[in-house]
Image (spheres, coloured by chain):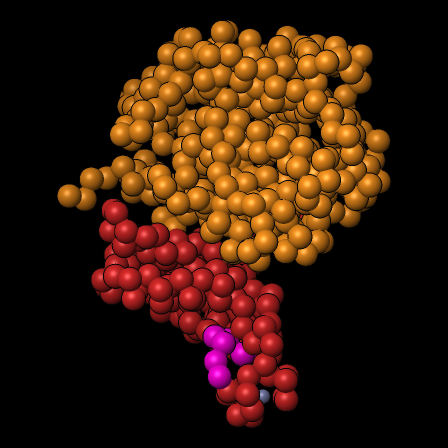
Amino acid sequence: MPIMQANTPTGIVGYGAYVPRYRVPATEISRVWTDGVGGVPIKEKAVAGLDEDTITISIEAARNALHRAQINPALLGAVWVGSESHPYAVKPSGTIVAEAIGAVPHTQAGDWEFACKAGTEAMQAGIGFVGSGMQPYVLAIGADTAQSRPGDALEYTAAAGGAAYIIGRAEESLAEFEATYSFVTDTPDFWRRPQAHYPSHGQRFTGEPAYFEHSVSAVKTLLMELGRSAKDYNYVTFHQPNAKFPQRAAKMLGFEKAQWEAGLLSPVVGNTYSGATMLGLTAILDIAKPGERILCASFGSGAGSDAFSLLVTERIAGRANMAPTTQAYIARRKEVDYALYTRYRGKLSMK
Amino acid sequence: MTVEIARHWRLNSQRYSLIGEECPACHYKIFPPRDVCPHCAEEAGPEFHFSGNGTVFSHTTVHTPPEGFEAQSPYTVALVKLDEGPMITAQLTDVDNGAVEIGLPVEMVTRKLAEQGDEGLILYGYKFRPQMAMA
Ligand SMILES: [Zn+2]
């Protein structure tokens, strides 16, 4: 059987979001590069401040997850950070996050990598760690401060943000994992060599054979194995490289707008890479009610998709307001122009 | 260099997350941690985790930063009165420099303080930002 289910049922015992304060509108980017001619893929994207990176984003999302889980951070058996923008090439983000939240030293810390699905991989591994009884809790984070080449199509969407999940046993959880599944092939849609500052991509190759093939196949297989269809779910969220792709994937699978709109954040935060699917899920958990079902599927270039089926429990009640909600972060908004944006993203050469 | 790495490393827990002490005699909350209670001079006591909430007591905007802090200039430094009592000096973040007022409720966040050039360490530590509403 291709779907994955732990011997001991697991679930999400706490979750936390983080979106930086700054926004650059897509029309401001098109003003600079196309004289405003042509459409833009989203309304605006979130930009990290001068003192933010994947580690600081991870720390705040993790603290929010701990506020909602109400557990002792020393019981976190692993602190894993999935990202393609780890601040160090060598030195784990996970150890710094673990130290800042009080999880050290009796923990297994480390970093994960798989383009935009690095964080959901860490969630799947967490289900295995907890489901096998090796650890009571695992913290899995997806966060990025994505870089994009000035003037490239990706510059409109490459954004910053992240989300953190504490995985524990099902009986303590706000939402139980019913099953998870991964669909992976060697597909060269998007990449970056170690010495390159900006990523390269296969232009139109990124759509059909990469994003849609993997996301749709992952969800189809998971639904088939569970004997379910789109109508069995209250909410669905996908990886969100722009506004169009996740809505089209949802339609291809038979979902309707009422199921995807709560988790669709890319129009107002952009593509937060490893944070994207996981932030869609925090926004859904903020409003979800006991007994509701959530389907979520990440996508990582290279390429693969991790799909999860979740059942919300009665313990969700009152948790949303134990930390700032995803929508509270989205509402906290300071617009910046292209000049300030280039300084914040370190695009100005100072030497 | 090694001495400096060791100095930053020893300060990690108090700098990342505002861990101080509570005086066992007078229950004064102490930050940063030290040998004796500044309030009653008894030996300082067990670890105490501050909530991170406080208010701005005074503030000034730095336009000519010390060496190593140029990257984030200009920035506002404040004297923050923590809810548990002690006063600490810290940078403010996620706020417009002109919008800071005495009495502004703030909360602790962990951010990048400085980078030791392109090849050195990145230093993280506490800053304060305007408190976010919970709902
Ligand atoms: Zn004392």
Q: Quadrant of ligand 1?
A: bottom right
Region of the chain picked out in magenta, as a range: B29-35
Would you identify the image quadrant in which residue A277 lies?
top right
Q: Quadrant of residue A327?
A: top right
**Chain in red?**
B
Please identify the quadrant where the N terminus of chain B is shown: bottom left
Chain letter for the orange part:
A
User: Does A8 lie within the magenta span?
Assistant: no
Q: What residue is at 46 percent from the left and 12 percent from the top?
A: A186
Residue A62 is situated, as x and y percent measured from the top left of the image, at 58, 47
Q: Is residue A79 left or right of residue B16?
A: right
Position above or below: A188 against A193: above
Residue A262 visible: yes
Does the rendering let one see residue B133?
no
Across and down, in percent, residue A225 comes to 75, 13
Q: Is residue A330 left or right of residue B64?
A: right
Quadrant of the rendered image containing residue A10: top right
* Residue A102 falls left or right of residue A168: left
* Residue depicted at 63% across the width and 54% down the height: A73
